[in-house]
Each structure stands twice: as C-alpha cells, then as structure tokens.
Image (tube, grey):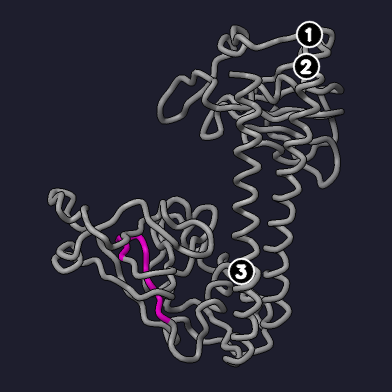
Amino acid sequence: MTGKNFVEKGFPAYGAGGINGYLQEHEFDKDGVILSANGARCGKCFYAQGKWTSLANTQIILPDISKAIPKFLWYQLNDERKWRRAGTAQPFIKPSDVKNKEIFLPEIKEQNRIVDILDVADALRQKRKQSLQLLDDFLRATFLDMFGDPLAKRNKFKTVPLGSMVDFIGGGTPSRKISEYWQGKHKWASSKDMKGLILKDTQERISDNAVKESVTKLVNPGTLLVVVKSKILLRYLPVLISESEVCFNQDIKGMVPNKDIDSWYLLFHMRIGQDALLQIARGANTEGLTLDHLRNYKLILAPKDIQEQFSVIAKKTVTMIENMQKSQNELDNQFNALTQRYFE
C-alpha cells in the first residue's frame, strides 16, 4: 500500500520502521506479526492488535490461533539475528524465508504461560523507559520555562552568536599506519562514542606521541563536544560534556565556554535548539556543519546566575537518569535472558 494520505486518528499503518501513521481504512481485524523485510530495520518485528493495515517493505504473519498465539510468535521472532537476510547495501528477507522459518511451537497452554511471564518482564522495562522519558521531558520543560525556546524569534533574554561566547577546538586522527599511536592512555573520541549527555569513555585510546605528532588535541574535562560531520545529523545532533581529558577526530568540534556561559546550560540549549543546526546539516549539498554554522548559531544570553540555577537541577536530574539507565540495562538483560531460555 503506497501513496496513501495519513490522518491524525484512524487505524495504525505499519511500515518497515513500525507505525508510520494512521489511515482511515484497515486490512486486518485480528492480532498479527509484521516483519520489516527491507532496509536498515530488516528483521525487526512488530505486534499489531485489533484493526490495522500494513505498508510496503513488510511481510505479514497471521497464525492459526488454534495452533499459535500471535504474541508468542512475536516474542520468538523479534530478533534480527534469527533472520537470514539477502543483499548488502539494501538487505531484504524473501517471502520463502518467512514461509520456511522453523519455530518453537509448544501446546497453546504452554505458549500462554510463556507469554504471561514475558509480558510481566516486558512491562517492567517499559515502565522504566517511561520514567526515563519523563525525566528527560522534565529537564526540557524546566529549560523552556527558565529561558524560553531557542528556536523562537523572540525570547526572555537577548541572543548572541555562539562564536562570541565559546572557543572552538578542532580534532584530528593520528596515522593508522603507526601502531604505537594507538597504544596509549589518552581517550580518543569519534562519532560512535557520542552517546548520552556525558562522555565517560571511548572505544579507542592514543599515546602521548600521537597527541604531539598529529593534529588531534587533548582538551580539558568539561569541554563540550559536538558532531559536525556524520549521517547521524539526519536524525539528531550529538552534543555532550567530556567527563575527563579527551582527544577527538575531525568529525567533532570542541567548545570551551567563556566566563559568561555555563557548560550545562549550553549543553541543553544546543540539544533543545538543535533543529536550527540540523536544518543546515540536512541541506542538499552538505552532510555536516561548518565552523561558520556553529559560530552563527543564536545563543540565548541569560544571566549567569540563572544559568547556574538550571545547571544544579540538570546535574541532579542527569544523575537520576544515569542510575535509572543502569536499572533499565539490567531489566533488558533479564528480559533477553528469558527469551533466550525459551527460544534458543
């Protein structure tokens, strides 16, 4: 089904990435499993209930409910590692692969028992995810209440170019041909390390000589790092604070705020106002941001004491988020262990 106009309310329409939107009409009126069969999400399964429809690049599994419970199949099949995918640049799953897929299928009573257990485990981790989202929403709402929206034309305080408030530091990559460069103590960040709000560690480290003999630089703790060249900019702007000394590659810029700007304030300003930069990064002829783009970014120049008030709130909330994230990871591991117990 293609070329359809979505509406705000209606029946969920499942595509390769999940629910794409809602349509007025539906094809199915029973529980089923939708398999993403093409592209980056190839092998991901979605569980549909009630009335729903499906779009292109999916395959539909509607079991005989006298033999198989749809949710039982979803729990079993929702693992991309279990699917044999053809193609390289654009992987896909053939209908014959779905038809010939071997599954574990105990009696209905046993299927119900397993589903009940997994439902409880899944509900626990979903509640934790909701709590994490609420904390994130709280920080966003607090920022907007104290300072206004970075994307608004008018705000509570005047705006200034980011370049007038921070010093920018470029990165670089030591030669990969010199193995000694990559056997050291200094953290070296690339885009794959730019996750979360605080950079705690990196996948690679470099030596003293690598710092001395290449263009990469070692920056102090508290430096803000922002990704300026990556396909990830099509989705969001990775920006975070370094917890310790760190070097980084040429796809990242470091930012050292002056005395009038608090680091945590700037971190959330750029995260909440990221669309102003992402619109530039998504331009037809660019995959990234230039130094001029960053320099011209409009920064709300709020009084430093109010910035610091927000910083105290942000640090406490982020500590809560980190602790809850650890709990989330434990719940995810427990859930994965259960599914492996039943299906592997």
In the image shown, does 190 or 207 lie closer to the viewer? Answer: 207
**Residue 246's spot in the image, x, y percent?**
34, 66
- Sequence-wise, the earlier of marks 3 and 1 is 1
Identity, as a three-letter code, of the amino acid under mark 1: Glu
Q: Secondary structure at mark 3?
A: helix
- The segment highlighted magenta reads 247-256
Quadrant including the N terminus? top right
- Mark 1 vs mark 2, CA separation in Å: 6 Å
**Are there few (<14), some (14-19), or many (20+) residues within 10 Å of tag 3?**
some
Answer whether residue 285 is visible to the viewer in this image: no
Label 3 close to label 1 by CB (< 8 Å): no
Q: Callout 1: helix, strand or loop?
A: loop
Magenta region includes residue 248: yes
Within the magenta stretch, is there residue 257?
no
Report the residue marked by disc 3.
272
Ranked by sequence position, the earlier of labels 3 and 2 is: 2
Where is residue 163? Give x, y as percent: 42, 82
Position of residue 131 measured from the top left corner of the image (x, y, whole percent)? 73, 56
Q: Is residue 287 left or right of residue 59?
A: left
Please name whichever residue, 327 or 256, is drawn nearer the observer in this view of the structure: 327
Regarding mark 2 in the picture, which secondary structure is present there?
helix
Gap between marks 3 and 1 measured at Cα: 51 Å
Is residue 68 visible in the rendered structure shown here?
yes
Tell me if label 1 and label 2 are in contact, CB under 8 Å: yes
The residue singled out by tag 1 in the image is 107
Q: Residue at x 40, y 27 (%)?
A: 88
> What residue would you read off at disc 2?
111
